[in-house]
Amino acid sequence: MHFKQLVSVSVILLGGSRACLHDSIIAPRVEDELATLRRRDVPVPLKTAIKNVRVFDGYVVSKPQTVIIDGEFITDSDENVEQVIDADNRILIPGLIDSHAHVQSVEGLENMTSYGVTTIFDMACPNYELCNSLKSNPGLASLYVSMLSALGPAGGNPKLNPVSPELLLYPGKDPKYLVDYAFGNGSNYFKIVNANSGGPTQEQQNELVDYAHSKGHFVVTHAPSVIAYTQAVTAKTDVLQHMPDDGLLSPCVIKSMKEDNLASTPTMEIFRRAYTIQPEIIQFLRGNNSANSTYENVVRNVKRQHIAGVPILAGTDAVGSSIPQFYFPFGDSLHQELVNLVDAGMTPAEALRAATIVPATVHRLNDRGVIKPGMRADLVLLNSNPLVNISNTRDIARVWAGGVEYANVAK
C-alpha cells in the first residue's frame, strides 16, 4: 500500500478506534474546542517594563532589575514602553515546561497556563485536527504533540493508545513507515510505547530511533519497567518517559544514559499519587499491581540518575478530568513534581531547571527556558522565593504566555 493510501485508511481506522475509547476517556469534540478558541478574548500585548524584579537565571536570583516585554519576546529596548509594572522585589522565573502530559482541550491549556505552565509536551493525540488546533494560541501554553505512537500488539494500555490493528508493530514488521506517517500528520516528535512483553522488539526500537534521527527527528519512549527502560536505553531514544517502579536500574544502564546524552522524564507525581492517595490509577493503568513495584524504587532510580548527571525533566502524566476513574489536575501537579524532585535529592534551583532550561535544551527549543533579551516572553512572577522553598512556585502573582498576560492565575 502506498504511503498516501495508508494515511487515508489509517485516519479512518483511528477515527473508529477513538470511538471505542469513550467508555474510558472523555474525548472533547473538535468542533466544540474550535468554537471555544474562536470565542476567546485575547488582550492586545502591551510593551511592558517589569521594574524592581529579581530574576532567576537558572542558578540564583538576581538583584532587582527591569525586564521588558515587547510582543512575544523579551527585549533590551526601553523605547515606547506602554505599561510599567512595579514588581516590588518579587521573583521572575521562566514559564514552566511540563514534559509529559495529556492535554486535549482549551480548558486543559487554560488550567496549565493559570499555574504558569507555558509549554506542554503532549504524549498521546486522540485526534489530529484537535491537536493541531491546540498547538499555538496567543496567551495560552504552547502544545507540542506526538500524533502516532509505535505500539506493539500488547505493548500498552489500549484505552490510552488509540492505534488501529493495521498500525500495530508485530514482530518482523518494518517500523519506519510509522515515522513518516507521524510527521506527515503534524507530529513534533516521535513516541515509542514499550511496556514489557508485546511492545516493539529491540530491533524495531533500534530501527525507529535510527530512522527518526536520520530524518532529524526527536524520539521519546514510554518505559515504565526495568526491562522496557533497558531496551529503550539500548536503542538510544532521546528521552525516556516514566521511571521503573518494579526494581532498580543497573549502574550500566545509567552510565549508558550519561554517555549517550539521554534524558529522563520520571513523572514521579503519577507514581506518588498511585501509591499514596489514588490507588485507582494503578488499577486503571495495569489492573492488579505487581508485588515488586513501589514508589521507593522510583525515588531511588531518580536519585541515582541525578547523582550520575543524567538530565532530568519535570513531567507529570496529568490527564485532568478526562478519565472518569480518577482526577489528575493540570498545572498544580507540575508544582508538586518539583517538590518530588527536591525530595529525590535535587536542590530547588536544580528542580526549577528541570522545568525550564533543561527541557528547553533537551527538546531543542532555543527560544525559551531562560529570561534574557530575544527569548520568548513566557514568564511567571512569584510572590515568594522558590529557592528558599520550592513550594513557593505555587505563590503566583502574574503569568505571561508569549508576551500576553494571563488574567486568571491560580491562587
Image: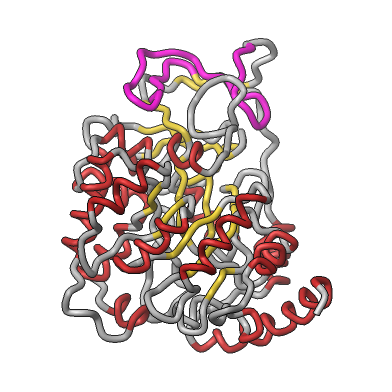
Please state the horizontal and vertical placement of residue 57, each as a whole percent of the image: 40, 23
Residue range in magenta is 51-77
- From the viewer's perspective, tell me whether residue 346 is left or right of residue 265: left
Instruction: Work out whether residue 165 can be spotted.
Output: yes
Image quarter for residue 174? Answer: bottom right
- Position in image of residue 238 (x %, y %): 48, 50
Q: Up-down: is 152 above or below 229?
A: below
- At 66% from the left edge and 71% from the top edge, which residue is drawn? 127
* Quadrant of the rendered image containing residue 354: top left
Note whether 362 is above or below 71 in the view shown: below
* In the foreground, 20 or 51: 20
Looking at the image, can residue 336 be seen? no
| Magenta segment includes 308 | no
Question: In the shown orientation, is residue 58 left or right of residue 370?
Answer: left
| Residue that appears at 53% across and 46% down | 119
Indicate yes or no whether the magenta region holds residue 68: yes
| Residue at image point 62% right, 23% down | 374
* Residue at position x 35%, y 57% in the image: 267
* Percent of width and height locating residue 20: 58, 89
